[in-house]
Image (cartoon, rainbow, N blue to C red):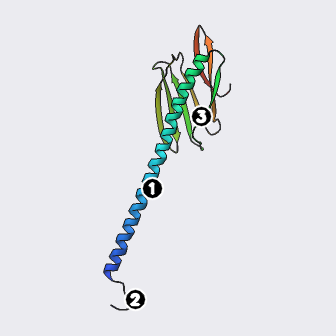
Amino acid sequence: MKRGQISLDFLFAIALIAITVLNMVQIASMQRSHAEAFDITTRLKIFSVDIRDTVAKVYASGNGFSAKKESPIPLRNGDSITIKLNAKSNTIIVTGNIGGRQYTTVQQSPIPLYQDESIQITPDKSEIWIKARVGGGKVYVELSYSP
């Protein structure tokens, strides 16, 4: 072999090492994206349980009681969290549109919901109020941006 000449075995070894390193980088990248998605899903699940418990607490406290809730996730432009109280199915649905993906959690309400309510948390409106109002002998739970 002449000086400056690279053997075919050496080139083959370099190619195998490069392919192995690229595969490791790809696996690490996939694992990171899965971990981020799991983190968002977990935070939204905990938030939906907190909303469910707060709805029950506000209902039990009665007319005029209100509680403030804030986004559990720092929201960027285009991100939102929608909270829906569904009277027909008596469920609380929390839907997050975060980072271009949609996540949904559903909680069964422990109290009767007499009217549908919906509100959206955005970067500009990061807090909501859950309020109780009495009307017609029933306690209604409402969602709003102000107390």
Report which residue position mark 1 lands on. 29
The x, y position of residue 76, in whole percent, is: 59, 44
- What residue is at 37 percent from the left and 66 percent from the top? 20
Q: Quadrant of residue 64?
A: top right
- What residue is at 46 percent from the left and 43 percent from the top? 38
Residue type of the residue flagged with mark 1: Ser
Report which residue position mark 2 lands on. 4
Q: Is residue 81 above or below residue 86?
A: below
The x, y position of residue 13, in whole percent, is: 34, 75
- Are the residues at dot 3 and dot 1 in contact (C-beta closer than 8 Å)? no
Q: How many neighbours does mark 2 have within 10 angstroms: few (below 14), some (14-19), or many (20 or more)?
A: few
Residue type of the residue flagged with mark 2: Gly
Helix, strand, or loop for circle 3?
strand
- What residue is at 65 percent from the left and 28 percent from the top? 145
**Left/right of residue 104 with respect to residue 59 in the rendered view:** left
User: Which disc number belongs to residue 121?
Assistant: 3
- Earlier in the chain: of badge 2 and badge 1, it is 2
Q: How many neighbours does mark 3 have within 10 angstroms: few (below 14), some (14-19), or many (20 or more)?
A: many
- Earlier in the chain: of badge 2 and badge 3, it is 2
Compute the Cα span from label 2 to label 3: 65 Å
The x, y position of residue 92, in whole percent, is: 50, 26
Q: Is residue 79 above or below residue 7?
A: above
Helix, strand, or loop for circle 1?
helix
- Earlier in the chain: of badge 3 and badge 1, it is 1
Helix, strand, or loop for circle 2?
loop
The quadrant of the rendering that contains the C terminus is: top right
The quadrant of the rendering that contains the N terminus is: bottom left
Compute the Cα span from label 3 to label 1: 30 Å
